[in-house]
Amino acid sequence: MKILLLGRGKTGSLVAEDARRRRHAIQVVGSKENPACAALTPDKLQSIDAVIDFTTPHVVPTHIEACVRAGKNMVVGTTGWYAELDRIRKMVEEHNTGFIYGPNFSIGVNLFLDIARASATALQHGYVGQIFERHHAHKKDAPSGTAMAIQRVIRDAHQAADAAPAGHNKAAPELEIISFREGEVVGMHEIVYETEADSIYLCHNANSRQGFAEGAIRATEWLQGKKGFYDFKDIWREL
C-alpha cells in the first residue's frame, strides 16, 4: 500500500517504521509541510491508498474533511476531537469512504476494555469505582480518550444489566476519571473498585508505543478495499 502518515511525533515515527517493516511505501508529512491542508489536496493524494493521522486534536477534523472529500480511506489515532464524531460520520457515509478511529489502537488496551466491561458487575454488588489515567506531560487532552472509553463501556454494561429482568434497578454513578500528566509516561490506565470489605485493582500499562503503531498499520491494512465508518474496538478481533 501507499500510505500517507500525518505526524512526526514519537508514535508517528514508530508507525512509519512498522509500515516499512510490513513492506508498505510510506510518506511522512509534518505540520510545517501541511499548512491549511496543503498536502491533502486531491492531486497530492491521487496515488495514496490511505492516510493515517497521529497529529493534534485541533487540526484533525480539517484533515479528515480534506481526505474524505478526496475519496481517501483514513485511520485516525489522535484523540480529543470526538465532539465532531457525528458530523464526521455523516461526511464519511456521504462520500462513501472508509474510516477507522479509536482512542487506542493497542490490542492489549482493547482486551482491557473487555475486562472493564465484565468488571461492571462490581457496581451491582456495592462497589464504588474510579478510573485513573497517567500520560506523559506533553499529551494535549485530558482525560484521555482511552479513559473515557473505559468509563463508557462500564456505564453501558451496567445499564444493560440493570435493564435485564433480574437487574437491581439501581442507577450507576459515572466512574470519576482522575488524570495525571507527568514525565514521559507512555500510558497507564487503572480501574479501582472498593467496598469496606476489599478493593479490586485492574491495570493496563503501555511499556512502549509499539502496540499503538502496530495496531494502526494493521487497521489500515484491514480497511483496504472497504467503505464505512468503524470504531477500532469493533474490528480489532478481525485483524
Image (cartoon, rainbow, N blue to C red):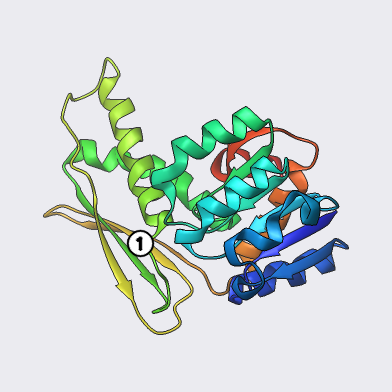
Q: Is residue 23 left or right of residue 17?
A: right
Residue 158, image x and y in percent?
29, 34
- Amino acid under disc 1: Glu
The answer to whether 195 is drawn above or below residue 235 in the figure is: below
Q: Residue furthest left?
A: 196
Q: Is residue 237 visible?
A: no
Tell me the quarter of the picture where residue 77 sits.
Answer: bottom right
- Residue in front for this viewpoint, 30 or 160: 30
Residue name at image x 75 percent, y 49 percent: 42
User: Which residue corresponds to mark 1?
Assistant: 190
Neighbor class of circle 1 (other Cα within 10 Å; few <14, some 14-19, many 20+) is many
Residue name at image x 42 percent, y 68 percent: 188
Tell me the quarter of the picture where residue 154 sits.
Answer: top left
Q: In this view, does 115 lie to the left or right of 159?
A: right
The answer to whether 197 is drawn above or below residue 206 in the figure is: above
Element at label 1: strand
The C terminus - image quarter: top right
- Residue in front for this viewpoint, 43 or 226: 43
Residue 153, image x and y in percent?
38, 41
The answer to whether 21 is drawn above or below residue 51 in the figure is: below
Q: Is residue 134 left or right of residue 105?
A: left
Residue 43, image x and y in percent?
80, 52
Tell me the quarter of the picture where residue 44 sits.
Answer: bottom right
Q: Can residue 123 be seen in this view?
A: yes
Residue name at image x 68 percent, y 38 percent: 98
